[in-house]
């Protein structure tokens, strides 16, 4: 049985991202952290989350970045929103976490625990 490993996409400023890091570290899970302020999320990776949750579920509709982006008022395609999200990670509900086949958005303890239980 290999040690579980998760990929966490987030930013150092996001308290939810730090909560995810803490959750997995406390359980001795190896974390591959992708700081979205340093490196944008790959489109293919983002699309996995979009396919599972839908684009709107990934957006932080309450966040200041969303307000500033005017996305609520722009007439744009899903493709356009995805491009914007890749360049402005603050638009996302962070963290995005992938552990094996389990994906989660935001602070989601139930999904995080499910990541630990799969093998």
Image (tube, rainbow, N blue to C red):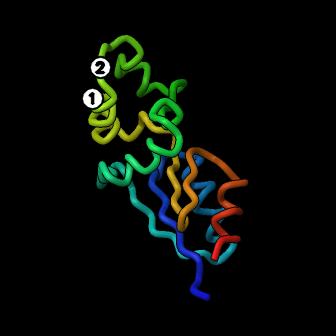
Left or right: 27 as drawn, with respect to 39: right
Vertical relation: 7 (above or below) 55: below
User: Label 1 neighbourhood size at 10 Å, few (<14), some (14-19), many (20+)?
Assistant: few
Dots 1, 2 in contact, CB < 8 A: yes
Quarter placement of the N terminus:
bottom right
Report the Cα–Cα distance between label 1 and label 2. 6 Å
Quarter placement of the C terminus:
bottom right
Q: Quadrant of residue 106?
A: top right
Left or right: 43 as drawn, with respect to 35: left
Name the residue beneath numbered marker 1: 80
Left or right: 1 as drawn, with respect to 93: right
Vertical relation: 38 (above or below) 91: below
- The residue that appears at 58% across and 59% down in the rendered structure is 102
- The residue that appears at 70% across and 71% down in the rendered structure is 117
- The residue that appears at 63% across and 47% down in the rendered structure is 107
Q: How many marks?
A: 2
Residue situated furthest bottom in the rendering:
1
Q: Position of residue 86 (x, y in %)?
A: 31, 41
Name the residue beneath numbered marker 2: 76
User: Label 2 neighbourhood size at 10 Å, few (<14), some (14-19), many (20+)?
Assistant: few
Q: Position of residue 26 (x, y in %)?
A: 68, 71
- The residue that appears at 62% across and 71% down in the rendered structure is 25
Q: Position of residue 69 (x, y in %)?
A: 35, 22
Left or right: 110 as drawn, with respect to 105: right
Q: Secondary structure at mark 1?
A: helix
């Amino acid at each position: 049985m290999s040690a579980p490993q998760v990929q966490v996409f987030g930013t150092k400023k996001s308290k939810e991202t730090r909560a995810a890091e803490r959750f997995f570290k406390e359980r001795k899970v190896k974390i591959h952290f992708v700081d979205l302020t340093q490196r944008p999320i790959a489109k293919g990776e983002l699309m996995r989350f979009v396919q599972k949750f839908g684009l709107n579920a990934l957006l932080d509709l309450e966040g200041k970045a969303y307000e500033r982006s005017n996305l609520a008022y722009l007439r744009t395609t899903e493709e356009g929103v995805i491009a914007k999200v890749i360049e402005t990670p603050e638009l996302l509900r962070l963290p995005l976490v992938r552990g094996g086949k389990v994906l989660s958005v935001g602070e989601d303890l139930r999904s995080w625990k499910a990541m630990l239980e799969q093998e």
